Image: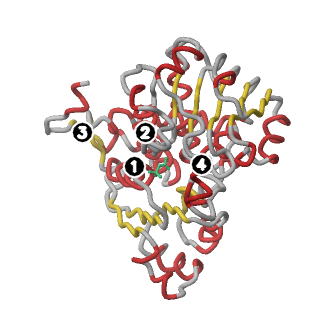
């Protein structure tokens, strides 16, 4: 695909060669993400970061990624601080805000809303999550993480064995990740959820049409015995009609160190898009896994900056110029010490 000026709305936009390009650029961003070097390549550019649903990682890492490339960030968080509460349409909002920005990231609770916004926008729009539909940058950073974790074990994405666990009906990260895996070969996917929260059949079909082996189950322990990646997800309470309904499923698929030791192959990598629900009645990834070296959740979150820097550099067409605008940093750098 031609990245320059493109909206990034769905993982289905990408072919395998595009994903490789994003990952190559993300690799090149590491000295900047780790603050060994700084670049001003996007000096003067403005990111409109518009988050109409709660977010810690996506919002802050998109903002940090843009800052690390030398650009400025303007944010809107929540409907209450937006004139959408006064009845302004997405069309008008997009026409106005795209006049203030060079690129926009948007999260919104309705499926399809970011695409609708992008149609009216005069600048590229990146989907930061639209309802239960998609979260393409998360899938890219997830796969980037999987690639890195497997590479250190001498494996590749082709032939991957992955279990996706939890609320697969509402979890947009797993929807996008499944679509992304469709451009790879010979993947074994185990989908572990309560029957009521199963992966949408259309996505299961996409996986099978791609030639992948798909197992659908509601039994955790038998599903995690022969996998490379255990990808856990949160019960998406905000997509249920009531908290009581979500509570029926909370805590059904807990992974802790004892279960990991008993059932998983050594070195099975544990991932989660985060936030993990650490309340006692959920505790989907127990804190007793925190010292497990195969818990990749914070490496995964760190990788979000690299991948989002890559998306900005590609969409704003500055990949070749990043290093030309770089210099060493002067300040004490804790990350550099690691
Ligand atoms: N993974 C993710 O989307 O996290 P946030 O909701 O904190 O952005």
Between 136 and 236, the residue placed more toward the observer is 236
Q: Does any portion of residue 23 appear in the rendered image?
A: yes
Q: Where residue 17 sits: x, y (%)?
A: 66, 35
Q: Are marks 4 and 1 in contact (CB under 8 Å)?
A: no
N-term-proximal mark, 3 vs 2: 2
Of marks 1 and 3, the one in the foreground: 1
Q: Does any portion of residue 5 appear in the rendered image?
A: no
Q: Which residue is mark 4?
A: 136
Q: Is mark 2 within 8 Å of ligand 1?
A: yes
Q: Which residue is mark 2?
A: 301
Q: Is mark 1 within 8 Å of ligand 1?
A: yes
Where disc 1 sits, the SS reads helix
Q: Are marks 2 and 1 in contact (CB under 8 Å)?
A: yes
Q: Which residue is mark 3?
A: 327
Q: Residues within 10 Å of mark 2 (few under 14, many from 20)?
A: many
Q: CA distance from mark 4 to mark 3?
A: 31 Å
N-term-proximal mark, 2 vs 4: 4
Of marks 4 and 3, the one in the foreground: 4
Q: Residues within 10 Å of mark 3 (few under 14, many from 20)?
A: few
Q: Are marks 3 and 2 in contact (CB under 8 Å)?
A: no
Question: Which image quarter is the C terminus in?
Answer: top left
Of marks 2 and 4, the one in the foreground: 2
Where disc 3 sits, the SS reads strand
**From what the image shows, is residue 97 above or below residue 273?**
below
Left or right of 55? Residue 69 is: left
Q: CA distance from mark 3 to mark 2?
A: 26 Å
Q: CA distance from mark 1 to mark 3?
A: 22 Å
Q: CA distance from mark 4 to mark 1?
A: 14 Å
Name the residue at 33% across, 62% down.
44
Q: How many marks?
A: 4
Q: Which mark is residue 61?
A: 1
């Amino acid at each position: 695909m031609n990245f320059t000026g493109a909206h990034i709305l769905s993982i289905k936009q990408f072919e395998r060669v595009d994903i490789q390009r994003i990952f190559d650029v993300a690799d090149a961003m590491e000295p900047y993400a780790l603050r060994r070097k700084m670049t001003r390549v996007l000096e003067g550019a403005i990111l409109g970061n518009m988050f109409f649903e709660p977010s810690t990682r996506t919002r802050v890492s998109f903002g940090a990624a843009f800052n690390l490339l030398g650009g400025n960030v303007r944010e809107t968080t929540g409907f209450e601080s937006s004139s959408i509460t006064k009845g302004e349409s997405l069309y008008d909002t997009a026409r106005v805000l795209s006049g203030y920005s060079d690129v926009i990231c948007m999260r919104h609770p309705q499926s399809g809303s970011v695409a609708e916004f992008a149609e009216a926008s005069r600048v590229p729009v990146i989907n930061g999550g639209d309802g239960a539909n998609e979260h393409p940058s998360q899938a890219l950073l997830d796969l980037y993480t999987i690639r890195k974790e497997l590479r250190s074990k001498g494996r590749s994405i082709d032939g991957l064995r992955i279990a996706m666990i939890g609320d697969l009906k509402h979890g947009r990260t797993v929807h996008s990740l499944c679509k992304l895996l469709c451009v790879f070969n010979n993947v074994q996917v185990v989908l572990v959820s309560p029957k009521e929260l199963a992966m949408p059949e259309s996505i299961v079909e996409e996986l099978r049409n791609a030639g992948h082996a798909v197992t659908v189950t509601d039994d955790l322990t038998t599903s995690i015995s022969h996998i490379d990646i255990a990808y856990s997800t949160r019960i998406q309470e905000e997509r249920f009609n009531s908290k009581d309904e979500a509570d029926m499923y909370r805590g059904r698929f807990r992974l802790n160190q004892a279960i990991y030791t008993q059932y998983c192959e050594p070195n099975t990598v544990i991932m989660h898009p985060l936030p993990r629900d650490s309340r006692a009645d959920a505790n989907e990834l127990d804190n007793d896994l925190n010292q497990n070296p195969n818990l990749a959740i914070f490496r995964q979150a760190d990788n979000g900056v690299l991948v989002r820097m890559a998306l900005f550099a590609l969409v704003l067409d500055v990949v070749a110029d990043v290093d030309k605008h770089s210099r060493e940093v002067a300040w004490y750098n804790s990350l550099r010490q690691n």
